[in-house]
Amino acid sequence: MSAWLTRHAQTSIGSLGRLSQQKLATLLTVLVIGIALALPACLHLLISNAQNATGNWNKAVDLTVFLKRPTSAEDASRTAGRIKQRRDVSNVEVITADAALKEFRHDSGFGAAIDALNENPLPHTLVVTPAADFTTSANLDSLAADLRAMPSVEVVQLDTAWVNRLNAILETVRRGLIVAAALLALGVMVIVGNTIRLDIQNRRAEIEVTKLVGGTDGFVRRPFLYNGIWYGLGGGITAWIITAAVIAILREPIGRLAGLYGSAFQLGGLDARATLILLGSGIVLGWLGSYLAATRHLRAIEPT
Amino acid sequence: MIRFDHVFKRYPNGREALSDLSLEIDSGEVVFLTGHSGAGKSSLLKLISLIERPTRGQLIINGQNVSGVSRRKVPAFRRQIGMVFQDHKLLHDRTIFDNVALPLIIAGVGTKEIGKRVRAALDQVGLLGREQSVPLELSTGEQQRVGIARAVVSKPPVLIADEPTGNLDPELSLEVMNIFRRFNEVGVTVLVASHDLYLLEHFPVRRVRLECGRVVDDIPAGISAGEKLVDPAKLITGSEGAM
């Protein structure tokens, strides 16, 4: 067991040493893999940041319910209490006509004009906050319909159209990310596979000798698998660096842009989980690409 | 140890390298395989090392019929046969130590044990102290001895050598043959393909002569090659006696 582990450690280090002897070729391969992996990583960040930026708005879709006039303040709070008992409602805020007028007078600067009115033209208003689990557009629509059916309700305002559009856009981009990631993963495997194929051709004599003195297919293949793993790991690290550089370049202007919209939004980078996935997929793709290439091409080399 | 039983070998291009060849080599024997190039010496050795398979007939090595050795089992089978090549087949980007250690590494021997056995093998061929050289720093004769050390380091019961002295001058050839003989003294079966007449004269071991893929002459050990080779009539009698 310990001899086996020692062999693997020696093979992996030996493979690393061999790769470092051909610096330029190795560097180019790793760079190509890195770029291929960085593209889906950046797309992933685009989506997760867009969700972060819009997530709060999405959850904060409130329904504004205007009650019929005349409705007494007692009726308004009774109606609010009834609505609040619904499962899909988390909170109902009552803005009485008087309070609304006061606020309007304060904010609008039409104080004198309002004073000229004989009576308060504003209705009582209920701001209904849906429960967190019921913010899908279908749920919101059925809630709005129920509220509209209540006898004291005049108008229900619900503006989910833009939320729906944004979600649809994000869903499209996410689907695109999956397709792009799959294609680029295939590309990484092809790159590694082709590099390994050339490597096998260059080491034909060595492979023949190894087979002659009793080396199994697995033994002959092992150093090439380690090559693939190193390529993949190097590519993953390169992709991480590229992604971090992109974030660093964009963070400041995006922060400024968000500031102009009065938001404290900060561009987020790859977290620990995403980093592990990036490095892990690099390793797995490198290994898989080299495994397929080595298994296929090593069979063809037999001593003569 | 090695038994050919009516073995035919025909290559895809139609050339028949071995034709109804029967030959038995006992455990612990030293056998010279002679004959012109193209007589089938190399083909015979390639069948033993499973580089090629018999077209017809049976080949039994160490009690095992080679037709029963599947592709997956070839590596394990080859580990019981030490092979020496005319062109050494050393790995030039590795040290002498690493070259000789290769069969042990493949067999999964522990690091300490490898060091011991590699040094013992290099000692036997007189190259102890050259472990860290690379093959190109060594002379042809020394490289051939490294090849022999690699062939015997895992102590195989059979040692086969294809023209091991082909590139060596007579003195070095004798040295190489003496090394083979020393291994034979500890029980290794040795089969050497060679057309080096000089060697044949110096080593009165069993000689098997091939011609057109058949055994035409089988001279037991102890009889000098000279007296047999001069008389073609005796030559044919010898071959019949062997069959």
Image (tube, helix red, strand yellow):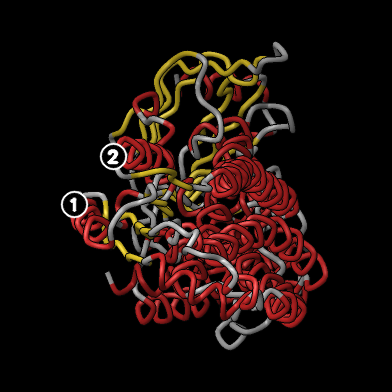
Amino acid type assigned to the residue bearing label 2 in the image: Met
Q: Which residue is mark 1?
A: A82
> What residue sits 50% from the left and 76% below the top?
A103
Q: Residues within 10 Å of mark 2 (few under 14, many from 20)?
A: few
| Residue A153 point in image, percent of width and height | 35, 44
| Any part of residue B22 in sight | yes
> What residue sits 31% from the left and 53% below the top?
A71
Q: Quadrant of residue B143?
A: bottom right
Q: Quick check: A87 left or right of A95?
A: left
Give residue A93's mark: none
Depth check, front residue: A270 or A118: A118
Q: How many angstroms separate mark 2 from mark 1 (CA)?
A: 10 Å
Instruction: Name above or below for residue B51 compared with residue A261.
Output: above
| Residue B217 point in image, percent of width and height | 56, 27
Q: Quadrant of the C terminus of chain B?
A: top left
Q: Which residue is mark 2?
A: A150
